[in-house]
Amino acid sequence: MPRIDRVTPMHHIELNAESIAQILSAYDAPQAGAGIVALLPEAERDRLPLLQNACRQHGLALAGGVFPALIEHQQFVRQGAWLLYFAQMPPYFLLPAVNQRGKPAGQIVVEAAQECLKRSAQDRQKPTLFMLFDSMVPNIASILDDVYLELADRVEYAGVNAGSETFQPMPCLFDEAAVIGDGVLGMLLPGSMAPALAHGFEPPERAMSATSTEGNRIAMIDWRPAFEVYQEIIKAQYDIDLTRDNFYEYAVHFPFGILRAGGDAVVRIPVALADDGALYCVGEIPENAMLVLLQAPEAGANNCIVHLAEKLKATHGSLDGKALLTFYCAGRKMHLGEAAEEELAELHAVTGIGEMAGALSLGEIGSTVRWGYPMFHNATLVCSPWQVP
C-alpha cells in the first residue's frame, strides 16, 4: 500500500480502479471536508470517471483539470494522474459556459470568489485565487481585468489553462460529479502557497502598434496587414524568410510581447494565420497595444530559472526537501524541445525541492512581481510550494 506523507501528500498514480482505491484507502479516514486536486493528461481523460466514482465513495471532494501532459521526476509524461491531498479542501467553484450565463463572465467569477472568501479560514497571509481556465475561453485577459477591479489586493492571483494541445474543444475541468468545458475552476489556496512566475524574455527596443485587433486576432500592425509586418521584422532582425508554408515552423520561436509599464513584456504566441493576413495568438491583444517581436530564449537563458527560484525563496524561505507544484507552458516546450526538461532539472536543483508535480499548460496567469496585477501569459513557468497547513 502506498506510503502517505502527511506534510506534502502529493502522489503520481496509475489511473486504474485498483491503484485509485489503494491510494484513497491509504489516507487516514477523511474528516468532513477533505479533498483532492487532480491533474490528468489528455491521454487518460476517459479514465476520469474511475477517479470521480472513487472520490464519491470515499467521501472526498475532487477538483482538477485535464492537460496535454504531466510533469513527473522533472520529465513530461502522458500517463497516470497527480493526486494532491487536502485534509481540509479549500473553497472552490466550478463554472461551465462562463460567457453564456446572462451577465459578464468577470462578474460571475468575482461573485464565486467572494463566496469562497466568506468560507475561507482566517490566515495572516492573503490567500491565492488560483484559476484553471479551459483554454478555449477567448477572453481570459478581460476576465482577469474585471476580477482585479473588484477584488484588487484581497488575494494573490495565479492560474493556468487546461485543455487539449490541439486547441480543439474538450471538456477539461471537473469536480467529483461533472466534467465541463468553456469555463473556469477557481480555488482559494492558502497563503503558504503564494506563486511565482517567470519567462526569461528580454524585450528588444523596436516597438509597433496593434492598430486593429479583436480578441486574440491581430488584423493590422502599424495600419498594415499583421502577417506582412511580422514577415518584415523577422527578416530584418533574424534574416529569416517567413512564408505561409513555414509559418508554423517559426511562429512559436518568435512570439509577440505586449509592453507593460516598467518595460516588462507579456508574451503572446501566434498559433494561426488567416487568409487575410491576420494573426491569431494564445490570449487577447488589446487594440493599440504596443508590441515587440521577441525571440524565445534558449533553456535557462537570462537566468530565468535562477530568478524564479530566488522569487520562491524570497517569499517562502528555504524549499529544501519540500514539494513544488509546477506548470510549464506547452508553447515554451515546443520551442525548446528536449531542452525543456533541462529547465525542469535546473529548477529542481537550484530550489533543492524534494518533489515536483505539475502539468504542461496552455497559457499562464500571474504577475512577474509579487502582489502585481494579474496578467495572462504565454511561454511561462508558474510555481507554488505545496505546503498544506
Image (tube, helix red, strand yellow):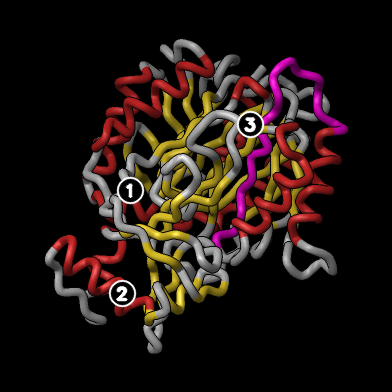
Kindly identify the amino acid type of the residue bearing the numbered disc 3: Leu
- Residue 326, image x, y percentages: 46, 35
Q: Secondary structure at mark 3?
A: helix
User: Is disc 2 surrounded by few (<14), some (14 to 19) or many (20+) residues within 10 Å?
Assistant: some
Residue 248: quarter of image: bottom left
User: Is disc 3 surrounded by few (<14), some (14 to 19) or many (20+) residues within 10 Å?
Assistant: many
Q: Which mark is residue 139?
A: none
Residue highlighted by disc 1: 203
- Viewer-nearest of labels 3 and 2? 2
Q: Which mark is residue 24?
A: 3
Residue 183: quarter of image: bottom right
Say which of 77 and 182 sits in front: 182
Residue highlighted by disc 2: 229
Which quarter of the image is occupied by the C terminus?
top right
Q: CA distance from mark 2 to mark 1?
A: 18 Å
- Residue 53, image x, y percentages: 70, 47
Residue 301: quarter of image: top left
